[in-house]
Every structure is written in C-alpha cells, then in structure tokens.
Amino acid sequence: MNKVFSIILVVLLSFSANADENLFSGTWTLVSGEYINYEGKLVSYESLNLRSIKVITNTHFSFVTMSGDKFWSSGTGTFEVTDSEYIESPIYTSFNSPEGKKYVFKYKKEGDKWVSSRWENDKRVEYEVWQRISD
C-alpha cells in the first residue's frame, strides 16, 4: 500500500511541477522585428541595430534592449497566456507605459522560435521573432 501511495504521490507532484511551467519559460534572444513608430512609419529592428534578451519565469517577464552599445528600453511585469495570445502587464518600464496597460500579442511557437505580433485597431503595430537560448 505504501508503495502505491508513493507512486501516486510522485505522479501528482510531477503534474503539479509541470502545471507551473509554461511554453514561454526560459531565456530568449531577439532575432528580428519591426514596429510602427510615433510617425506611423514601419521601422525594422535591424535598422536600429536592436538586440534584446527576455527572461520569462512561471509568472513574470523581464527584458533589456540595446541599440548598438546604447541602452534602448527595458521592462518587467507579469504575463498570462491563452491558446493564441501572450499578454504582458508591465509593472516597471523605461518607457512611458500607462498604468494598467496590457500588451496583447498573437503568437506562434515553431520549435525554439516564438513569433509574435501586436495589433491595434486592426493594424499590426509590432512584430517580433525570438529564439530560445535556455530553459
């Protein structure tokens, strides 16, 4: 009986640990992207020489972005995931993000790549490709 109980306990703990993980947990590096700037123009991240690392835990995200050797932006906060959306709720940012603002990204996972796009009023305003560099 004790052996059966031990096996059941191990199985339940395994499921519990896996339930806390999500498909975004890990460390990511920015591969490419583009966004619509304040003038309404499409700007590629490559033209700005942007590099970024994003770290995601079970409950929080944090990123730092550089333009060449100069600081560009950073942010940290909580997030949630649905079957089709990755939603960031920043707590602290280096840019002017309204309190309570949520950034909703549609996403696709392709192996260790994560492709996301953010839309406002039926217009894509941000597109990013991330590559996982560690779990």
Image (cartoon, helix red, strand yellow):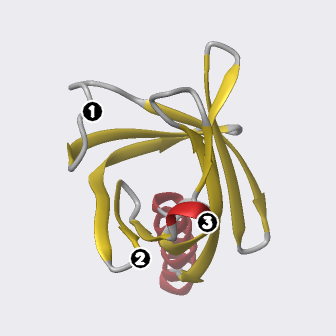
Residue 62, label in figure: none
Disc 1 is placed on an element classified as loop
When asked about the image quadrant of residue 72, the answer is: bottom left
The residue where tag 2 is placed is 68
Tell whether 91 sits left or right of 5: left
Tell whether 90 sits left or right of 34: left
User: What's the residue type where badge 2 is placed?
Assistant: Gly
Residue at 24 percent of width and 25 percent of height: 98
Q: Nearer the viewer, residue 53 or 88?
A: 53
Q: Nearer the viewer, residue 46 or 88?
A: 46
Q: Earlier in the sequence, mark 1 or mark 2?
A: 2
The residue where tag 3 is placed is 46
Alpha-carbon span between mark 2 and mark 3: 10 Å
When asked about the image quadrant of residue 81, the answer is: top right
The residue where tag 1 is placed is 97
Disc 3 is placed on an element classified as helix
Alpha-carbon span between mark 1 and mark 2: 23 Å
Q: In the current view of this chain or complex, which residue is farthest to the right?
A: 110
Q: Residues within 10 Å of mark 2 (few under 14, many from 20)?
A: few
Compared to residue 83, the image places residue 77 above or below, namely below
Tell whether 59 sits left or right of 115: left
User: What's the residue type where badge 3 is placed?
Assistant: Glu
Residue at 55 percent of width and 59 percent of height: 22
User: What's the residue type where badge 1 is placed?
Assistant: Ser
Q: Is residue 34 in sight in this rendering?
A: yes
Q: Nearer the viewer, residue 38 or 100?
A: 38
Q: Is residue 129 in sight in this rendering?
A: no
Q: Earlier in the sequence, mark 3 or mark 1?
A: 3
Q: Residues within 10 Å of mark 1 (few under 14, many from 20)?
A: some
Q: Residues within 10 Å of mark 3 (few under 14, many from 20)?
A: few
Residue at 54 percent of width and 86 percent of height: 3
